Image (cartoon, rainbow, N blue to C red):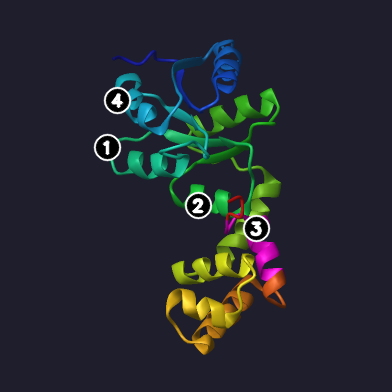
């Protein structure tokens, strides 16, 4: 399929029909935009990718099944991926960090005004990045902080459930002292004063999920 020379080709990926319809309607009014597809799942997005050859993908992060991060990783394992703007209702530090680490070129909230969204698409299509200043500042702070290990994230989940060091040790078949050392490392990396504050910050930044 040949590209129209002056059009920025856009693929919309979101599991909510209202969002897909609204974005398609809004963006189609722009003279140099062409919405070439709208997918409701990550799997559908990958299938449409080969058919529609978009320049820009507007990608929701949180979708059932194959989520936005999975899509980002998948397209960068392929040939010439589109430039991706994450469009989401969430702005937790970890969401932003993981999206950028996975190759996103922009990050916008779904509440973003139309003019900013249009400007962001044009900017990213031109080879630039677009991350709002407030989010960029928090991203810089997150990137300067030592990353938690997989085990530390698991222990954070246990802390959120109120488990003691001894109980955590039992869960992971390690000693209470080793569990305590992990907790101390978490507190140091998150730059907090105790385990309660560690859990609070972890939830706020999207490091752990306590919705279950």
Q: Residue at x 50, y 52 (%)?
A: 98
Check whether the beta carbons of the residues at disc 1 and disc 3 lie within 8 A of each other. no
Q: Nearer the viewer, residue 202 or 76?
A: 202
CA–CA distance between discs 4 and 3? 37 Å
Residue on which disc 3 sits: 203
In depth, the one of 91 and 26 nearer the eye is 91
Dot 1 or dot 3, earlier in sequence: 1
Labels 4 and 3 touching (C-beta < 8 A): no
- Split into 4 quadrants, where in the image is the N terminus? top left
Q: Earlier in the sequence, mark 4 or mark 1?
A: 4
Q: Give the residue pinned by disc 1.
A: 79
Residue 31 position by quadrant: top right
Question: Could you tell whether 108 is left or right of 153 in the image?
Answer: right
- Residue picked out by circle 4: 50
Q: Earlier in the sequence, mark 4 or mark 3?
A: 4
Q: Main secondary structure of the magenta part?
A: helix
Range drawn in magenta: 197-208
Q: Is residue 45 above or below residue 86?
A: above
- The percent position of residue 171, horizontal first and vertical second, equals 47, 74
User: What kind of element bears circle 1?
Assistant: loop
Is-magenta flag for residue 201?
yes
Q: CA distance from mark 1 to mark 3?
A: 36 Å
Could you say where residue 129 lies in the image, as x and y percent from the top left? Answer: 54, 41
Question: Which of the two residues, 60 or 135, is positioned nearer the viewer here?
Answer: 60
Q: Can residue 32 be seen in this snapshot?
A: yes
Q: CA distance from mark 2 to mark 1?
A: 21 Å
How far is disc 4 from disc 1 in space, using C-alphas?
10 Å
Residue 199 percent location from the top left of the image: 66, 66
* Label 3, residues with CA under 10 Å away: few <14, some 14-19, many ≥20: some
Check disc 2: other Cα within 10 Å, few if <14, some if 14-19, many if 20+: few
Distance from the alpha carbon under mark 4 to that under mark 2: 25 Å
Residue linked to disc 2: 98
């Amino acid at each position: 399929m040949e590209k129209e020379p002056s059009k920025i080709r856009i693929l919309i990926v979101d599991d909510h029909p209202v969002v897909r319809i609204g974005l398609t309607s809004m963006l189609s009014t722009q003279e140099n935009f062409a919405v070439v597809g709208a997918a409701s799942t990550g799997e559908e997005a990958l299938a449409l990718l080969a058919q529609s050859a978009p320049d820009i993908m507007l990608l929701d992060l949180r979708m059932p099944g194959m989520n936005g991060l999975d899509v980002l990783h998948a397209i960068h394992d392929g040939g010439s991926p589109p430039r991706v703007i994450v469009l989401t209702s969430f702005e937790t530090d970890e969401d932003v960090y993981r999206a950028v680490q996975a190759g996103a070129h922009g990050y916008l909230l779904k509440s973003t005004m139309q003019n900013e969204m249009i400007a962001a698409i044009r900017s990213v299509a031109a080879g630039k990045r677009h991350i709002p200043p407030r989010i960029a500042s928090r991203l810089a702070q997150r990137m300067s902080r030592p990353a938690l290990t997989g085990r530390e994230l698991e222990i954070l989940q246990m802390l959120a459930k109120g488990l003691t060091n001894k109980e955590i040790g039992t869960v992971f078949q390690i000693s209470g002292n080793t569990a305590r050392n992990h907790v101390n490392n978490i507190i140091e990396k998150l730059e907090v004063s105790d385990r309660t504050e560690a859990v609070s910050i972890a939830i706020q930044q999207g490091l752990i999920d306590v919705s279950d």
